[in-house]
Each structure stands twice: as structure tokens, then as C-alpha cells.
Image (cartoon, rainbow, N blue to C red):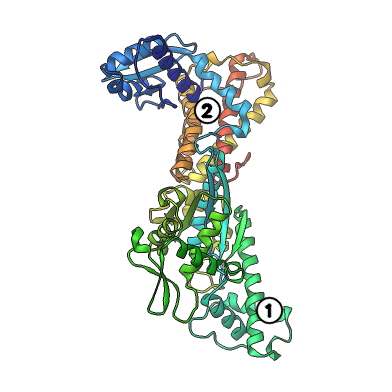
């Protein structure tokens, strides 16, 4: 019996009690069951009676007694105890608990999928680094977290589109072009330009593509340097992200907003909403009406749109493309953007509480990492991947809440020991895979027998209970935007497996021991654990090796 099935059973007996007239209470859409901290209190617990007692007009314990009596008659439930002020502690019989092993194996990678966010249509924007240089360690954190969140949202029933906003317009692109052209001429980069050996590489690529660049008029040469340099740098960003197993559904160009008139149209639409005003020769958006600390300029006195105007146009583009929910994942230096982005949503006639969500990530420090010689004073993403490995980087960054500053030890992440969390989890998967191979060599086959009642060892009960929590963990991680919940769950599951492995044999001990249904049934549990570990690692973008 899965936790979901038990939840339905509890809800069912409540509904029956209400229908029969024994209770007068509102039947909730969902009943929550949780693992009690003390295993002596049963397999699962619910505080449903405490939640409903006031509305039902009877004491919680009395309501709990009614539910306990009815629930005890449900097939698969061994015992129901009423504890404290009205908690229901539920113990399943071994067969009902063990049946979960077969359910997980038969579901395969689909186990863990849930409907927590069914019906939600989400645009998820993350990384969105300027195409003026290589990705660095800060971008790496958002790449890991953002892609994991994308996977979790999809597994929890949401329709999600991942999007990269390419900031390919404005002053930074002019400075970028001037820097590339200067290095092509073997001149120092201008003030406010981009230093670093990577600019020399871009200049060489531009010259290779346009050998007569230096003979062209300066304005024409600048445009060519910008376009070729930009395409080259963006292609490198895409390649590095692909090596990190991060892929975007949409690469949205800021330049298209300007070239297609979307910025001007956005200003006009916001003016129609009554939130645009003119003052001091500029065009403003009255964002203070919606909690921003000051009003924002959309069009400067010289007629040039601001970055904020492009932000407004971009928000409206997402709205027009059919995304009622828009999630922005931004770095710590963008904290001031939260209020203004929510104000844009409000000015556009949306409810900022539901239409826009801004997640701010904190800084990261990685001890032992070397600054990039190619890019100057930064730690490059591609160097991190080469030094530590994609799996260790992704897992380690997904293991912590985004809003917490992070200090990691690079050498520790490279170690192949149980002190390294990603190794610990991956090793559990490899150990399970090895057990499956050896059991097959011994002639133990799952398809020859399964008796869930045999899974009655205390380590088996603990392992089964942890497996049963996986769909809920996935749903909570998606709903709360917290991929680290999956990582911590996987570490707990790996620990439960190792304890079970140490105390319960899957393979016969010696050639003379008869193969029984106990061996076969335990092989089902072994495979169920492998299934969940593999799926959990995949949700974090981490591989599940069969050998280590």
C-alpha cells in the first residue's frame, strides 16, 4: 500500500462515516499521512481528527476513535491507535507494506510522478547570462538549480517551458563589440570594455570570418565585430550548458523586442492601463502604486528606452505567449529587481502573487578553484566541470537551498568516499546494480515469485516506508521550488539501503542453499530502491552509474 493509497483509504472511511450520519464533517480533497518520527508509533500517522474536530462539533479523540474503528477494517491495515489529543497512528500488515516494492518496479521511472501542480503552465527563466563573456560559477549554480526545478515541475504535472533571455541589446553589447574590435586591431580594450584572453580568441574568430575587417569603415567593422563575436560567444555558452546537461526550450533575444517594436507597444499598453506618465521630458511607469520603492523610467529624455522598458516588454511577451505563471531565477545582485518586476505584473493587470515569482540565489565560494586565465578574474563554469565533473557539481549545487550562501570544498567533491554525498548516493545505486547482476548469476529471478508478506524485517519496513515518500518529496520540492529536498531524500534512502544490505541477504549463501521466494522478493525490493535512486538522480541531472 502506497502512502497515496492509504490517504485515499482514510478519506474513504471519513466519507463513509459522514454518509452514514455517524459524523458531521467536511471531507477534504486530500488527506495527509506522514511518517512518525518514532517507528514504535506505527508506519504512518495523520492529524485529520484534530483538523476536523471543531467543524464536526466533537472532541478530536472521539472523532479519531470513529475513524480508527472503520480504518482498522480496511484490507492491509494491521492496527490503528489513537494517540495524544487525537492522532491516528496506522500500522500496515507486512503484505500491504511490501506490495509497494512491486508497485515501484512496475511503475519504473514514472514512480515519483505526481499531480501536485497539474494544470499549472509555467515559464521558467534561469541563467540568462549576458553573451559578452563565458559562464562563471554563479551561473553554474542557477544552471544546476534551474534545470533540476524544470524536471521537478514536469514530474509534478506542470506544463513547463524553460527559457534563456539573451541580453543582446544595449550598451553592454556596444562595449563588447568595441572590445573585440580593439583586440582585432591589437589595441587595448576601451574603458568599460571586456578584458580577458577570451576576447582575443573572439577577435581571431572575427578576423577568420572577415579577413578584411580592419580595412572596413569603423562603423561597419564595429557591427561585424559585434555580430560575429556575439554569435561565437553565445554558441560557446550553449555548448557549455549542453555539457552540463542543461537544455532550454526557448532562447529569447532581447534584440527582437527592440527590432520588432515590442518595447514601444509595451509602453503603449501600459499607458492604456493608466500607469504611464510623462515628466521631465521622460516617460515613466508609476510602479510605486504597487510597492516599488520609486517610479521607473521607461523612455529617457533622449528617446532611448531603458533596460526596464525591455523588461516590461519581455514580461508582456511571456504573458502573450500563454504563460500565466512566470518564474524568474536571478542572482544575488538582482535583489532590487523583485519589486519592480512584480510592479510590472501589477501594471499589466495581473496579480503579482500568482503571475510572477522571483527566486534570488546567493553567492557561492568554491575552495581550491582556480581563476580562469582565459576569462580574467572569474571561475569559469567549463573549468569547474572539467575539474570536478558534471555530476559532482550539479549534485552539490542542488543540495542546498538557493537562498543560502554556499561554501564548498572542491577537493572534497572530487573524492570517491562516503564523505562525498554524490559519491555516497551513486555508490548505493552501483551497489544495487551489482547485487542484481550477482543474483542473476545465482539464478535468482524476480519473475519466479513475490510474497510481500516476507518483507517483515525492521530494515525492510524502514526502506519501504522511505521509498513510499518519494512522490510526496518530488511534489513538495516542485511546489516549494526546493530541489535540495530530493538530494537530502536520496541520501536518506541510500543510508536505509546500506543498512538493509548489511542485515538481509538477497542471494543464497552458497551453492547448496535453496533459492526461495524470500530471495526473489528481496530482489524486488532491491530493484525498487534502484528505480527510485535512479529517478531521483535524474531529477537532479545526475547520472546513476551501474559500476564505480
Q: Position of residue 312 (x, y in %)?
A: 48, 63
Q: How many marks?
A: 2
Secondary structure under tag 2 reads: helix
Residue for point 54% across, 65% down:
135
Q: Position of residue 92 (x, y in %)?
A: 45, 16
> Is residue 112 visible in this depiction of the protein?
yes
Q: Position of residue 492 (x, y in %)?
A: 45, 35
Q: Nearer the viewer, residue 473 or 300?
A: 300
Q: Quadrant of residue 63?
A: top left
Vertical comparison of 202 with 331: above or below: below
Left or right placement of residue 54 versus residue 487 in this view: left
Secondary structure under tag 1 reads: helix
Q: CA distance from mark 2 to mark 1?
A: 59 Å
Mark 2 and mark 1 lie on one chain; the one further toward the N terminus is: 1
Q: Which residue is mark 2?
A: 501
Mark 2: few/some/many CA within 10 Å (<14, 14-19, 20+): some
Mark 2 or mark 1: which is in front?
1
Left or right placement of residue 251 versus residue 396 in this view: right
Q: Which residue is mark 1?
A: 206
Q: Position of residue 62 (x, y in %)?
A: 28, 13
Quadrant containing the C terminus is: top right
Q: Quadrant of residue 37?
A: top left
> Is residue 503 visible in this depiction of the protein?
no
Amino acid at each position: 500500500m502506497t502512502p497515496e493509497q492509504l490517504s485515499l483509504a482514510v478519506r474513504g472511511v471519513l466519507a463513509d462515516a459522514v454518509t452514514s450520519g455517524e459524523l458531521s464533517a467536511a471531507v477534504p480533497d486530500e488527506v495527509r499521512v506522514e511518517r512518525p518520527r518514532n517507528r514504535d508509533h506505527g508506519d504512518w500517522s495523520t492529524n485529520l481528527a484534530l483538523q476536523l474536530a471543531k467543524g464536526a462539533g466533537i472532541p478530536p479523540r472521539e472523532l479519531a476513535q470513529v475513524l480508527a474503528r472503520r480504518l482498522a477494517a480496511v484490507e492491509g491495515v494491521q492496527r490503528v491507535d489513537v494517540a495524544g489529543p487525537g492522532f491516528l497512528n496506522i500500522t500496515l500488515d507486512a503484505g500491504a507494506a511490501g506490495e509497494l516494492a512491486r508497485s515501484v518496479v512496475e511503475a519504473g521511472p514514472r514512480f515519483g510522478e505526481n499531480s501536485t501542480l497539474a494544470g499549472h503552465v509555467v515559464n521558467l527563466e534561469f541563467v540568462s547570462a549576458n553573451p559578452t563573456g563565458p559562464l562563471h560559477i554563479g551561473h553554474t549554480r542557477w544552471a544546476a538549480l534551474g534545470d533540476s526545478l524544470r524536471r521537478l515541475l514536469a514530474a509534478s504535472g506542470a506544463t513547463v517551458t524553460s527559457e534563456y533571455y539573451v541580453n543582446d541589446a544595449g550598451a553592454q553589447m556596444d562595449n563588447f563589440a568595441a572590445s573585440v574590435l580593439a583586440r582585432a586591431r591589437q589595441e587595448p580594450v576601451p574603458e568599460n570594455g571586456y578584458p580577458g584572453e577570451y576576447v582575443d580568441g573572439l577577435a581571431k574568430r572575427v578576423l577568420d570570418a572577415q579577413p578584411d575587417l580592419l580595412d572596413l569603415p569603423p562603423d561597419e567593422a564595429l557591427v561585424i565585430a559585434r555580430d560575429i563575436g556575439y554569435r561565437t560567444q553565445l554558441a560557446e555558452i550553449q555548448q557549455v550548458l549542453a555539457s552540463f546537461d542543461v537544455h532550454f526550450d526557448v532562447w529569447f533575444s532581447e534584440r527582437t523586442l527592440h527590432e520588432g517594436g515590442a518595447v514601444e507597444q509595451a509602453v503603449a499598453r501600459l499607458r492604456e492601463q493608466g500607469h504611464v506618465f510623462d515628466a521631465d521630458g521622460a516617460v515613466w511607469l508609476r510602479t510605486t502604486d504597487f510597492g516599488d520603492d520609486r517610479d521607473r523610467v521607461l523612455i529617457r529624455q533622449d528617446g532611448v528606452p531603458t533596460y526596464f522598458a525591455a523588461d516590461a516588454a519581455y514580461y508582456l511577451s511571456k504573458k502573450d505567449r500563454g504563460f500565466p505563471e512566470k518564474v524568474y531565477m536571478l542572482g544575488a545582485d538582482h535583489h532590487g529587481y523583485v519589486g519592480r518586476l512584480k510592479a510590472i505584473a501589477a501594471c499589466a493587470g495581473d496579480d503579482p502573487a500568482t503571475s510572477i515569482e522571483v527566486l534570488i540565489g546567493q553567492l557561492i565560494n568554491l575552495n581550491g578553484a582556480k581563476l580562469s586565465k582565459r576569462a580574467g578574474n572569474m571561475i569559469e563554469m567549463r573549468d569547474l566541470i572539467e575539474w570536478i565533473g558534471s555530476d559532482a557539481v550539479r549534485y552539490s549545487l542542488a543540495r542546498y537551498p538557493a537562498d543560502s550562501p554556499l561554501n564548498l570544498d572542491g577537493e572534497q567533491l572530487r573524492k570517491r568516499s562516503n564523505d562525498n554525498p554524490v559519491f555516497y548516493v551513486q555508490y548505493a545505486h552501483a551497489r544495487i546494480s551489482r547485487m542484481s547482476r550477482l543474483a542473476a548469476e545465482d539464478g535468482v529471478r524476480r519473475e519466479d515469485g513475490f510474497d510481500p508478506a516476507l518483507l517483515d524485517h525492521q530494515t525492510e519496513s524502514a526502506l519501504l516506508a522511505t521509498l513510499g515518500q518519494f512522490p510526496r518529496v518530488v511534489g513538495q520540492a516542485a511546489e516549494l521550488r526546493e530541489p535540495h529536498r530530493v538530494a537530502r531524500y536520496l541520501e536518506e534512502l541510500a543510508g536505509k539501503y546500506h543498512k538493509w544490505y548489511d542485515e538481509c541477504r538477497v542471494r543464497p549463501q552458497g551453492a547448496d542453499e535453496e533459492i526461495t521466494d524470500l530471495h526473489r522478493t528481496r530482489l524486488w525490493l532491491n530493484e525498487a530502491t534502484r528505480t527510485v535512486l535512479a529517478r531521483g538522480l535524474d531529477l537532479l541531472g545526475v547520472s546513476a552509474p551501474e559500476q564505480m
